[in-house]
Amino acid sequence: MQSVVPVHGVMAEFDNPSEFVAAIHAVKEAGYEGFDAYSPMPVEEAAEAMGLHGSRLPLIVLCGGITGFCFGYALAYWTGVINYPLNIGGRPLHSWPAYIPVLFECTVLFAALTAVFGMLGLNGLPQHYHPVFNVERFALASKNRFFVCIEATDPKFELEDTKRFLQSLTPVAVSEVES
């Protein structure tokens, strides 16, 4: 009895950025939605072709900064007015200008931590294993090759049809990506 290896997708390899971007356009036009692209360097046209326009990260960082501001204000108010009030020279207990350095530092701290952990979360990291590393030629993705992988989770994915489609784009190689 022959064991069947589950397939993660089908990957095509290209040797220059222009063919790579043209392939991404063709994949989008063919109606595939579940695909990813890998390149050894940033290719702005590839991100545009994939439709990766905006990120939720700036909004997440803003919310982290606002949370830090509120936390800093609550901390300064609680320590200066409620927990340890000191009336020195007749000054009011709630003197908000004295809180400005604490507010600034808490805002920056929370925004920075939110940026780091938000980026990790949105990128799905840490991810210690990905099926594309099963393809032997994928090691060239960090040197000089460009890859487009159509994943099996795509509703339009059919193994043989997807292979034929990718081969029609004249890649250097087409490989099955085992899970």
Image (cartoon, grey):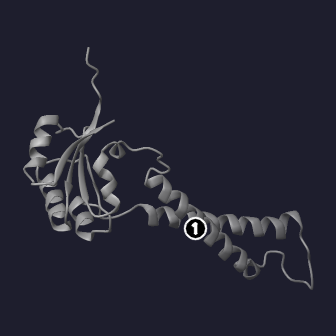
Task: Tell me where residue 47 appears, x and y as whole percent.
Answer: 27, 64
Left or right side of 147 for 54: right
Residue 113, visible in the rendered structure: yes
Residue 100 higher or lower than 23, as above or below: below
What amino acid type is highlighted by mark number 1?
Ala
Residue 92 higher or lower than 176, as above or below: below
Quarter of the figure with the C terminus: top left
Residue furthest out toward the top: 1
Name the quadrant containing residue 153: top left
Task: Tell me where residue 28 appears, x and y as whole percent.
Answer: 16, 54
Task: Tell me where residue 156 appears, x and y as whole percent.
Answer: 16, 39
Name the quadrant containing residue 103: bottom right
Quarter of the figure with the N terminus: top left
Q: Residue at x 73, y 78 (%)?
A: 96
Q: Residue at x 10, y 46 (%)?
A: 165
**Residue with the mark numbered 1:** 112
Left or right side of 111 for 87: right
Residue 128 higher or lower than 95, as above or below: above
Quick one: label 1, few (<14), some, or many (20+) residues within 10 Å? some
- Nearer to me, 104 or 2: 2
